[in-house]
Image: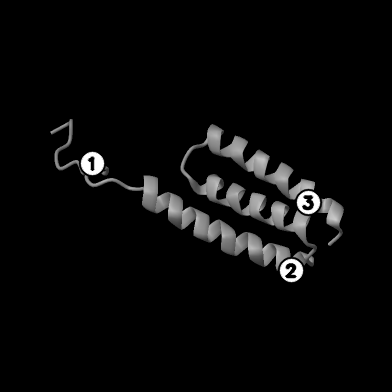
Amino acid sequence: MSWDTWWLWIAFGVVLLIVEVAAPGFIALGLAVGAFVVGLLLLVMGMSLPVALLVWAVASLVAWLVIRKLAGERKGQVKIWTTDINE
């Protein structure tokens, strides 16, 4: 990939951040972090598209796992109903 495509990855990360604000759930946030990582790596050094996609996938997974660990599921978050309102 050309060195001047780094800004596309940064813009993609910003779009994913907007998606995260519109539909919170920490999924798009991890993808956005991965896109920012690829954008910064492309700014520093060039890489091919398959390598960039691989870096994006790995960085997104790591970011999602860290975010999930820090701000993820809390104990007792799921409510299980045992009675019905119509009973």
Tell me the quarter of the image containing the N terminus: bottom right
Q: Position of residue 47 (x, y in %)?
A: 78, 66
Q: Quadrant of residue 37?
A: bottom right
Q: Disc number at residue 79? A: 1
Relative vertical location of residue 29 with respect to residue 55 in this rendering, above or below? above
Measuring from the top left, give residue 68's x and y in whole percent. Answer: 41, 51
Q: At 66% across and 52% down in the image, what residue appears?
A: 35
Q: Is residue 21 left or right of residue 4?
A: left
Q: Do tag 2 and tag 1 residues touch (Cβ < 8 Å)?
A: no
Q: Amino acid at mark 1?
A: Lys
Kindly indicate the quadrant of the structure image that contains residue 15.
top right
Mark 1: secondary structure: loop
Q: Which mark is residue 6?
A: 3
Question: How many marks can you see?
Answer: 3
From mark 2 to mark 1, how far is it between C-alphas?
43 Å
Vertical placement of residue 54 versus 11, above or below = below
Q: Quadrant of the C terminus?
A: top left
Q: Mark 2 is on which residue type? A: Pro
At label 3, the amino acid type is: Trp
Residue identified by numbered label 2 = 50
Instruction: For label 1, count other residues whose C-alpha is less than 10 Å away and answer few (under 14), some (14-19) or many (20+).
Output: few
Q: Are marks 2 and 3 in contact (CB under 8 Å)?
A: no
- Separation of residues labelled 2 and 3 (CA atoms): 15 Å
Relative to residue 15, is residue 1 depicted above or below?
below
Q: Residue 13: where, in percent of width, then height?
A: 66, 45
Q: Earlier in the sequence, mark 2 or mark 3?
A: 3
Look at the picture and state if 79 lies above or below 54. Answer: above
Q: In percent of the image, x 55 and y 46: which residue is there? A: 28
Q: Position of residue 7 (x, y in %)?
A: 78, 46
Camera-side mark, 2 or 1: 2
Is residue 69 or residue 84 the one in the foreground? Answer: 69
